[in-house]
Each structure stands twice: as structure tokens, then as C-alpha cells.
Image (cartoon, grey):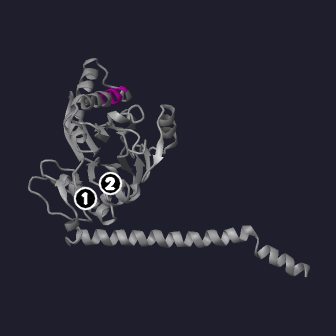
């Protein structure tokens, strides 16, 4: 009896039960992830084979040949509130060129996002030219430049009563031959593909992020669960440009990340949260890598585009289509930047 009791105790111990449960859950998780990956690959095959059954579900708001690298899709929303900006050579310093890329996700309307598209790179360019004029070119103070530029942009949009309760997130990147600078304000995101791995270049500003929650509550605000965590029950991002009525809880100060460029850098993706809500960093990089390698093609090549521009635009378009296929209900804006050339 003692032996049987001990055998029973050992076989039904919590540790063994946990191990069996963990093994079962792990197996189910692997099967689920494998199934999702196969489903995504089938969607990519449908899009790349020219079957427009998925393409018909997308509503393109702005995809013109004068602005390559990007895709802007209104999706299932009634209004397009996103905006993108691609400004190659927006600042020149002797033989060095600075390129600017920006994705703006508006809310409450499109006016703030549109204003950022037209003005933010100009405001930043003026600040950079002052820095260059002062001889500070080797090591620019990117933190100060970005923070001051975002603050001036925020003042501009808040000066007019037309904006009202509107606002916009902003993720922007400045690329030059030796470094990449990303400034993020909100829940849009930038991701770098380096040596086959996805490297985050920004951190989403969500109201329930511990440091953001502490900052909001310290300033007298609250985060309320109203169809998701929202500042004062209104806004699902804790930082943005505009949103005058939510100051000081929602701020326009960006977080800045500077990366030195390396030989293994392949490309960079900037996109609004319409994409990141349903697509992981790794999956997005996987899709873009296949497009840039010429293994997936889903749109015809325009005569105005060279091969590099075509492949980047193709990658952005395919990401938008996959995002819609995975059920995104938001506007979707994507910029793909090839860092190999």
C-alpha cells in the first residue's frame, strides 16, 4: 500500500501535471503559429498570383507614381486620416544628403496629419540647417533637433481653431550615409531589418505602458478602459501632435533613437498602427525581404519607376493587402526604405 500510494502521489504531483500541461500547450501553440504562418503564405500567394479578390477589398486613397516607396490605404474606414511624406535630399550638407520619411496617423480628422505631411520636414530641415551653419555636422544633437521640431509643429497646428479636437501620431526617420535617426510620437512604428533580424527603431506610446501611465497620472490625468485603454477615456495613444484639449496628459515630445548604419542593414519599414495591430515586426520584414529579392510580385511596374523603387512600392503594397486580409479595420500607411543602395 505504501508503494502504491507513493506511486499515485508521484504520478499526480503538481510538477508532473504542470509539465504535461506545458507540453500540451506548447504543442498547441506551435500548431497554431504554424497554421497562421501557412495562412499568411497562402494570402501572399494569392496576392502575388495577380488574383484581385483580395485587392478589391482594399480602397486606395493615395498611391501615385510620383511618390514611390509607399502605400496608403483607407481600408474599412469611411475617411482617410493617414498621411505620408517622402522627401529625398531634403537637406544637403556638402556632398552628404539627408533623406526624410514620415508616417502620420490622424484621429478626429485628417487636418493635423496633412499639416505634418506638408510642414514637419521643413521645420526639421530649418533646425538642421541652423546646426550645420554653426559647424555642428559631425555629431548633431538629434534629441534636441527632433524635440524642438515636434514642439514647433505642435504649436503650429494648435494655433488654429480649425483643428479642434484633432491630432496625429508621427514616426519620422532621417537617413544619411552613416546613420539612421528615428523620432516617434504615438503608436506608429519603425522597424529595421539587419542581417535578417527585425530590430525595433521605436517604442509604441500606449496609455497602459507603465512609464506612460505613471506620467499621465502624475500630471492629473487618468487612463480609462473604454473599448481599450484610453487617455481620459478618449485617446488610445499617449503622445501625439495636436489634441489641445488633452494637454498636459497627451504630449508631443518624441522619443529619439539613433542607429549607426552597418553593412548588414537591409531595409526599414515605417507604418501606422493599422498595420502593426495585426502584423508582427518579424512577419513584416519577412514579406518585404521576399519582395526586395524579387520572389513576390503583386503589382505591375510603372514606367516612371526604376527597379529599386518598384520593389519597395511593391513591398509596401503587399504589406497593405496582407494587413487587410488579416482583418485590420484601420487606415493603413506603409513606407519601405531600401538601405542596400
Q: Are marks 1 and 2 in contact (CB under 8 Å)?
A: yes
Q: Secondary structure at mark 1?
A: loop
Q: Residue 194: where, in percent of width, then height?
A: 39, 50
Per the rendering, the mark at residue 172 is: none
Q: Residue 159: where, in percent of width, then height?
A: 24, 28
Badge 1 density bin: few <14, some 14–19, many ≥20, Cα 10 Å = many
Q: Whole-Å distance between the Cαs marked 1 and 2? A: 9 Å
Per the rendering, the mark at residue 274 is: 2
State the predominant SS element of the stretch in magenta. helix
Q: Specify start and end residues of the magenta stretch as a single range.
A: 144-149
Side (left or right) of 218 relative to 123: right
Q: Residue 310: where, in percent of width, then height?
A: 18, 56
Q: Secondary structure at mark 2?
A: helix
Residue 193 visible to an observer of this rendering: yes
Q: Residue furthest left?
A: 303
Quarter of the image for residue 144 reads top left
Per the rendering, the mark at residue 75 is: 1
Residue 264 visible to an observer of this rendering: no
- The residue at 45%/71% (across/down) is 34
Amino acid at each position: 500500500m505504501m508503494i502504491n500510494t507513493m506511486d499515485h502521489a508521484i504520478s499526480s504531483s503538481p510538477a508532473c501535471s504542470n509539465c504535461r500541461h506545458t507540453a500540451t500547450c506548447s504543442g498547441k501553440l506551435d500548431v497554431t503559429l504554424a497554421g497562421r504562418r501557412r495562412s499568411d503564405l497562402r494570402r501572399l500567394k494569392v496576392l502575388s498570383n495577380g488574383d484581385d479578390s483580395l485587392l478589391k477589398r482594399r480602397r486606395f486613397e493615395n498611391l501615385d507614381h510620383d511618390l514611390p516607396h509607399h502605400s496608403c490605404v483607407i481600408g474599412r474606414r469611411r475617411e482617410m486620416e493617414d498621411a505620408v511624406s517622402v522627401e529625398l535630399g531634403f537637406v544637403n550638407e556638402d556632398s552628404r544628403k539627408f533623406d526624410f520619411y514620415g508616417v502620420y496617423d490622424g484621429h478626429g480628422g485628417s487636418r493635423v496629419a496633412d499639416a505634418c505631411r506638408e510642414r514637419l520636414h521643413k521645420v526639421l530641415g530649418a533646425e538642421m540647417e541652423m546646426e550645420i551653419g554653426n559647424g555642428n555636422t559631425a555629431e548633431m544633437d538629434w534629441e534636441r533637433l527632433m524635440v524642438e521640431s515636434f514642439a514647433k509643429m505642435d504649436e503650429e497646428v494648435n494655433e488654429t481653431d480649425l483643428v479642434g479636437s484633432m491630432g496625429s501620431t508621427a514616426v519620422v526617420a532621417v537617413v544619411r550615409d552613416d546613420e539612421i535617426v528615428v523620432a516617434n510620437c504615438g503608436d506608429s512604428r519603425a522597424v529595421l531589418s539587419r542581417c535578417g533580424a527585425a530590430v525595433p527603431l521605436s517604442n509604441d506610446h500606449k496609455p497602459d505602458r507603465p512609464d506612460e501611465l505613471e506620467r499621465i497620472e502624475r500630471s492629473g490625468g487618468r487612463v480609462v478602459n473604454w473599448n481599450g485603454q484610453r487617455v481620459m477615456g478618449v485617446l488610445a495613444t499617449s503622445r501625439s501632435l495636436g489634441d489641445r484639449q488633452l494637454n498636459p496628459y497627451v504630449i508631443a515630445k518624441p522619443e529619439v533613437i539613433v542607429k549607426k548604419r552597418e553593412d548588414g542593414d537591409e531595409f526599414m519599414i515605417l507604418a501606422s498602427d493599422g498595420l502593426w495591430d495585426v502584423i508582427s515586426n518579424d512577419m513584416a520584414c519577412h514579406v518585404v525581404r521576399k519582395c526586395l529579392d524579387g520572389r513576390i510580385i503583386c503589382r505591375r511596374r510603372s514606367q516612371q519607376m526604376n527597379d529599386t523603387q518598384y520593389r519597395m512600392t511593391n513591398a509596401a503594397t503587399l504589406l497593405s493587402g496582407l494587413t487587410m486580409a488579416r482583418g485590420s479595420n484601420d487606415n493603413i500607411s506603409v513606407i519601405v526604405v531600401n538601405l542596400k543602395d
